């Protein structure tokens, strides 16, 4: 990909290395929830620190819109990071200016310093040249380890890469390697499973995937819009009637590029979107009663998806096949996810990601059994759309 990583960074002893990380963890009442993101960037930090670098962490938190806001301070994360990496993490009240400069000047070789939220400055999101220059003053080298922020062209994700010798961190490297294997130069056949609520939020993604994969499973609420576009009555299922033309366009693009679109043959329907609602099984060609809605794909569809998986070398997955938060409508998602996990043991390359997908795979108990599970929401989706990610592009030589 023409991107240098930590293996190529050379001798970092005594150098000031600005490391962009994603520390945008869930936080309530000053307490940190899931620490996955802190955990993900720890290897890059400890590796640089062990090599004697002065490791200076840059990150955003929340959406303070260019103003200092104490509820969005990164201060509590410094402590959590210290626990994670088992060494001290100092904190500076600002990411630029005097506070940052003096904290950096105080660092010993191998020390780790976290700078305050980059988004306290409007220049960050505007990718303002003066702001990026001010950030760059504190570093000799730049490492980007925040794939999940790479879809934004901000000062700390993009601007800095043009000002300092730039490298990918370990987490960024493994994300890029997995994504390249899955859609860049994949082993064929490749299948994609795309579910979730709406077609309208995933048009670009579907349009890109039909040109890249051999089979595309469309499940979840968005499949209703496809069925509707084919003249099937979906009762009062979630559907976007105004996207019927989009669905037809995607189906015809798929046909042109030799991608088989797999829509649900059968479905589980209920009168209400409610946990424990009485579910009945229907074939989709029969249509759905007017008082019923599709909340999951049915067992015949699950079998077809799993059979297809048996023949594929690569699987890309985004979005649940049904309303997986409310049992029993989690059944298809769980069954297909577990089948994918089993096939992964037999050599399938499985890459999943994007918002609810992580929660769905955690629910199915197989989050650690896919070849790669991306926790980058927006960046993963934009990558599935085939869009260049500014934070990644800027690392290319
Ligand atoms: P997305 O954020 O687009 O990936 O959509 C995920 C959401 O789609 C989840 O909250 C699911 O409950 C929902 N979903 C999946 N299938 C259906 C369905 N058949 N009807 C309504 N909602 C669904």
Image (cartoon, rainbow, N blue to C red):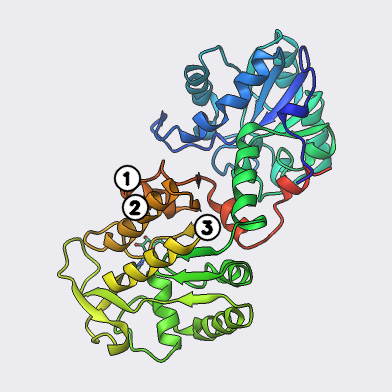
Q: How many marks?
A: 3
Nearer the observer: mark 1 or 3; the answer is 3
* Location of residue 173 (image quadrant): top right
Q: CA distance from mark 1 to mark 3?
A: 22 Å
Asked which secondary structure carries label 1, the reply is loop
Q: Look at the numbered discs 2 and 1 and tell me whether their residues touch, using CB distance below 8 Å.
A: yes
Nearer the observer: mark 2 or 1; the answer is 2
Q: CA distance from mark 2 to mark 1?
A: 8 Å
**Is residue 262 rendered to the left or right of residue 52?**
left
**View quadrant of ligand 1:** bottom left
**Badge 3, how many Cα within 10 Å: few under 14, some, many 20+?**
many
Q: Nearer the viewer, residue 2 or 237?
A: 2
**Is residue 180 rendered to the left or right of residue 23?**
right
Q: Is mark 1 within 8 Å of ligand 1?
A: no
* Location of residue 219 (image quadrant): bottom left
Q: Which residue is mark 2?
A: 338
| Residue depicted at 40% across the width and 44% down the height | 367
Q: Which residue is mark 3?
A: 313
- The quadrant of the image that shows the C terminus is top right
């Amino acid at each position: 990909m023409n991107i240098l990583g930590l293996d190529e960074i050379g001798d970092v002893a005594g150098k000031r290395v600005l490391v962009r990380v994603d520390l945008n963890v869930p936080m309530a009442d000053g307490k940190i929830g899931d620490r996955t993101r802190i955990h993900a960037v720890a290897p890059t930090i400890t590796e640089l620190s062990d090599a004697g670098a002065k490791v200076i962490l840059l990150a955003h938190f929340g959406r303070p819109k260019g103003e200092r806001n104490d509820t969005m301070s990164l201060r509590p994360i410094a402590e959590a990071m210290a626990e994670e990496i088992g060494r001290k993490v100092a904190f500076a009240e600002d990411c630029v200016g005097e506070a940052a400069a003096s904290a950096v000047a105080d660092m010993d070789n191998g020390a780790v310093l976290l700078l305050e939220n980059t988004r306290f400055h409007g220049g960050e999101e505007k990718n303002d040249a003066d702001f990026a220059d001010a950030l760059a003053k504190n570093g000799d080298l730049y490492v980007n380890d925040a794939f999940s922020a790479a879809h934004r062209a901000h000062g700390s994700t993009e601007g800095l890469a043009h000002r300092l010798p730039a490298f990918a961190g370990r987490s960024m490297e493994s994300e890029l390697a997995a994504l390249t294997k899955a859609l860049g130069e994949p082993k064929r056949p490749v299948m994609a499973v795309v579910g979730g609520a709406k077609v309208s939020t995933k048009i670009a993604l579907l349009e890109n995937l039909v040109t890249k994969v051999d089979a595309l499973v469309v499940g979840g609420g968005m499949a209703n819009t496809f069925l509707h576009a084919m003249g099937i009555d979906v009762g009062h299922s979630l559907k976007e009637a105004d996207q019927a033309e989009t669905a037809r366009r995607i189906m015809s693009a798929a046909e042109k590029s030799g991608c088989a679109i797999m829509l649900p043959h059968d479905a589980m329907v209920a009168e209400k979107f409610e946990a424990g609602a009485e579910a009945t099984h229907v074939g989709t060609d029969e249509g759905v009663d007017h008082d019923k809605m599709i909340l999951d794909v049915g067992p015949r569809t699950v079998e077809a998806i799993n059979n297809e998986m048996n023949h594929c070398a690569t699987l890309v997955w985004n979005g649940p096949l049904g309303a997986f938060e409310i049992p029993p409508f989690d059944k298809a998602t769980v069954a297909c996810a577990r089948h994918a996990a089993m096939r992964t043991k037999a050599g399938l390359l499985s890459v999943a990601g994007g918002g609810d997908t992580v929660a769905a795979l955690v629910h199915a108990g197989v989050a650690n059994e896919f070849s790669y599970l991306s926790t980058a929401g927006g960046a993963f989706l934009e990558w599935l759309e085939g869009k260049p990610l500014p934070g990644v592009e800027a690392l290319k030589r």
